[in-house]
Amino acid sequence: MAVAETASRLNIKEAPLKSVEQQGLQSVQRSRELLVQNRAALSNHILGLLMEFDVVIPKGWAALHQHISLVLEDAENGIPHMFRPTLHRMYQRYLQLKEDINFLNEQIKQLVKQNEACTRLLNIEGVGPISAALLFATLGTGKAFKNGREFSAYISLTPKQYSSGGKTNLIGISRHIANHRLRSVLTQGARAYVHRLKEPQTPKQKWL
């Protein structure tokens, strides 16, 4: 009944359909995101197990890459002999994930260069290949949206509204209803751009 009721209302806006190209680029991006999550999980797994044997490695992928070989070579650090082959295999899996992520990063860069819409999106302040791919996969040609405010609302970059008795209250941006990955990369890109913007010159830079 709810679906039928919604379909009968003329002011309900339909979600835009994705093209095959959008779906393909989105699939590559989602696969990359899965590998990034797996790398983070495996890194935390290795660090947590080493801490069980009082071997502490600083957080971060660079630190893990720097110290793990030394840990495996040190025969007196308290790590049991039976665990060392497993630790070595886990580290090799980590390196494979890193190589696969680098491959997908390069693939996304090439796909973005070949896509005219993505190339235009790269001209936006704080937008790189990853965010351009995510924007294109969500935005497409942009014809489904009347203006930027409508698209911002679509990806939940605008505050939620609670209206009652003719009064409209803005209650902040929702953390639960959103394209979390897209919103995250856009926020990070904007912060990075503003951080580098030491002396704004144009009106737009001053607004940022």
Image: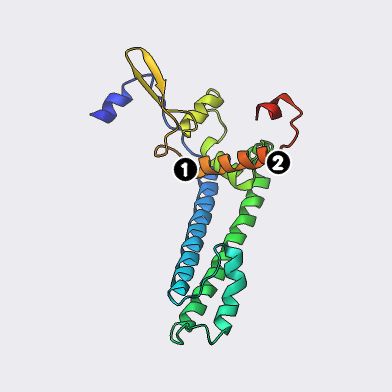
Residue 174's spot in the image, x, y percent? Answer: 42, 34
State the quadrant of the N terminus: top left
Q: Would residue 160 be seen by someone viewing this image from the given angle?
A: yes
* Amino acid bearing label 2: Arg
Residue at (59% x, 73% y) in the render: 67
Decide: is 90 above or below 187.
below
Residue 166's spot in the image, x, y percent? Answer: 35, 12
Q: Secondary structure at mark 1?
A: helix
Specify the farthest residue to the front.
54
Horizontal arrangement in the rendering, residue 102 relative to residue 184 (left or right): right
Rendered image quadrant of residue 147: top right
Q: 176 or 103, which lies in front?
A: 176
Q: 3 or 164, which lies in front?
A: 164
Rendered image quadrant of residue 140: top right
Residue 183's spot in the image, x, y percent? Answer: 51, 40
Q: 162 or 3, which lies in front?
A: 162
Q: 204 or 21, which lies in front?
A: 204
Decide: is 107 above or below 167.
below
State the quadrant of the C terminus: top right
* Amino acid bearing label 1: His
Residue 64's spot in the image, x, y percent? Answer: 57, 69
Residue 37: which numbered mark, if any?
none
Task: Measure the alpha-carbon separation of dots 1 and 2.
Answer: 24 Å
Of badges 1 and 2, nearer the viewer stands 2
Q: Secondary structure at mark 2?
A: helix
Rendered image quadrant of residue 52: bottom left
Which tag, 1 or 2, sits closer to the chain's start?
1
Residue at (31% x, 25% y) in the render: 6
Residue at (63% x, 49% y) in the render: 111
Residue 180: which numbered mark, if any?
1
- Coloring basis for residues: rainbow
Instruction: Report which residue position mark 2 lands on.
Output: 196
